[in-house]
Image: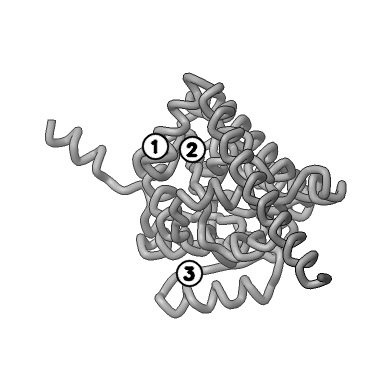
Amino acid sequence: MNLHRRKRSARYVGPDTHAIITGGSSGIGLATARQLARRGARVSLIARTKSGLDRAAAELESHGATVVTAAVDVSDRIAVDGAVAELVSRQGVCDVLVTAAGITHPGYFRELADEPFREVMDTNYFGTLWPIRSVVPSMIERGNGRVIGISSIIGMYGTFGYTAVSPAKFAIRGLFESLRDELTPYGVHVGYICPPDVDTPHFAYEQPLLPDEYKEFASAMAVLPPERVATAVVRSIERRKTRMVLGTANRVAVATFGLIPSALHWYVDRVVRKVRRRRHHHRRRKAAGRATQQV
């Protein structure tokens, strides 16, 4: 009994661990790198911009971490393969992969150009797939490894204003659920995290683009710090959690809407009508004000 308990309580992440993190220069990726580095892991960061990677590496190294970086576009399969090979040659085999790279572009479907749909899918889905394709063969061969991805609460159900983003998050969830079943027999743990809005540079970027209807939905939801998501990532690594939906209200919503999809549609329609009535009244007041000025 005691031996069993000691085995279960032993940490997976430690000084012998090499963790590769995409999107590692900021936000959830950097927060995860901090937590893994504090546990002694050797950390490799992948992101698009060298300047951001240099800042992240300097911060981590100032706390004693061993850090290597690679500036590549995660949607480029060949570049990702090359980057992973270089990181492995310098830091050893990849024990943990965390795919936190992603972009966002909300807006009304009818107003969006074509490009965001392709760009978001390329970065969020294929930018998740390619690093996994690079590291999983070695993990299978060794019979050990951890692959953790960042999906979103908007990957659990379609979301107003996120027609360019929500489908990519659904795709990530489908990938990880399928991978979990295939890789578990080989000793490779696969898990994914579904947070709500997170206080990252992407969150700041999308604020002026958000439809009023989504802002109404989001007004009742807490914005999480990236450290909270990073804590969930580490928990998934250590406790082999497959899916983690963050926030009690979100877990209740996912369970409820999964059982009664019409409840979600009823709620969304109610909020949309409320926002549109408010918008209509605002326009009428403005029109009345202009008419008064003209008189």
Mark 1 or mark 2: name the one nearer the start of the chain: 2
Residue 283 visible somewhere in the drawing:
yes
Q: Considering only order in the chain, which callout, 2 or 3, is on the residue closer to the N terminus?
A: 3
Do the CB atoms of the residues marked 3 and 2 lie less than 8 Å apart? no
Callout 1: few (<14), some (14-19), or many (20+) C-alpha neighbours within 10 Å?
some
* Image: 224 above or below 63: above
Measuring from the top left, give residue 73's x and y in whole percent.
75, 58
Q: Position of residue 128 (x, y in %)?
A: 65, 45
| Residue behind mark 3 | 66
> How far apart in space, not on screen, are marks 3 and 2 (Cα)?
25 Å
Where is residue 105? Give x, y as percent. 72, 53
Which residue corresponds to mark 1? 240
Q: Residue at x 59, y 60 (%)?
A: 203
Q: What whole-number distance in Å separates the C-alpha atoms at marks 1 and 2?
A: 7 Å
Tell me: 116 left or right of 4: right
Where is residue 225, by image quadrant? bottom left
Q: Quick one: label 3 or label 1, which is nearer the N terminus? A: 3
Q: Look at discs 3 and 1 and give the one toward the viewer.
A: 1
Q: Nearer the viewer, residue 50 or 145?
A: 50
Q: Quadrant of residue 157?
A: top right
Q: Residues within 10 Å of mark 3 (few under 14, many from 20)?
A: some
The Cα–Cα distance between marks 3 and 1, rounded to whole angstroms, is 25 Å
Q: Callout 3: helix, strand or loop?
A: loop
Q: For mark 2, does the 10 Å Cα neighbourhood hold few (<14), some (14 to 19), or many (20 or more) residues?
A: many
Q: Which residue is the site of mark 2?
A: 191
Q: Are marks 1 and 2 in contact (CB under 8 Å)?
A: yes
On the image, the x and y values in percent for residue 200 come to: 55, 63
Q: Nearer the viewer, residue 5 or 274?
A: 274
